[in-house]
Image (tube, rainbow, N blue to C red):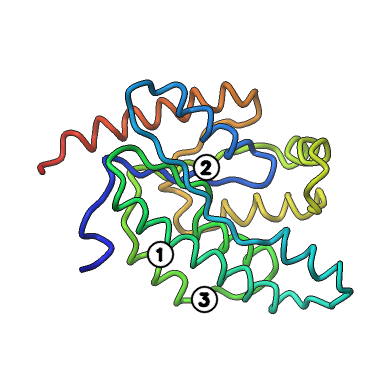
Amino acid sequence: MTLHARRPSALIVVLGVDGAGKSTAAREVAELLPGTPVLVLGNYSGRKTIAGLARRFALPLPVQVADILETTVRVLNVVLNHLRARRFDGLVIMDRHLYCQLALRKTRGIRRRRMLEALLGMLPKAQAVVYFDIPAEQAYERIALRGEDQESLEDLQRFRQAYAELPWYPAFTVIDAGGSTENSALQLQRVIAKALESSASLPV
């Protein structure tokens, strides 16, 4: 049996730089879809935890080593969450995906890894991959208020550019995330409504 054996009624992936509001919007949109079972899954890389442990124990963390650790965690989360999605009869929203790690690698100047891209091609296709677009300066202001992230403005600028340079970017549904999280959630809701309508029209 492959990962394509079953699929949820709709699978939506949300992407964006830190501070874009994608996680908050993903949670809020569930409240805008009464009667629709919604499962939000986080495909995290453990980047903050890994960096925090390195600082705590005063261990140097070369970029390549950090990438290997984060990619391993991300891949495990993505695969496990796709397996969870197969068992869920409803809308699945994945917060982050392998696209994020590929963009991070580009930001760090690490060459593309064909194995990661091959895995992305093997996984079930989302009805929509939604990119939350926000100016790097505004994203930086948001994460500064949170006080949890370590990214600099330059990091966010490079990360945003890296997303735009991904070969899959032209197929992303881009929404303006520069307003309120409520507005982002409403835009996401409209994308989801179209995806659910399209999914319902497919033959069983």
Disc 3 marks which amino acid?
Arg
**Can you name the residue that lies furthest to the right here?**
58
Mark 3 or mark 2: name the one nearer the start of the chain: 3
Q: Give the left or right position of residue 32, taking residue 54 as reference.
A: left
Q: Give the left or right position of residue 42, taking residue 110 as reference.
A: left
Alpha-carbon distance for marks 1 and 2?
17 Å
Q: Residues within 10 Å of mark 1 (few under 14, many from 20)?
A: some
Q: Which residue is mark 1?
A: 120
Residue 103 percent coordinates (x, y): 59, 60
Q: Which residue is mark 2?
A: 131
Alpha-carbon distance for marks 1 and 3?
11 Å
Residue under the point 31% across and 30% down: 194
For residue 113, the mark is 3
SS type, badge 1: helix
Quadrant containing the C terminus is: top left
Residue under the point 68% across and 46% down: 18
Residue under the point 53% across and 50% down: 42
Mark 1 or mark 2: name the one nearer the start of the chain: 1
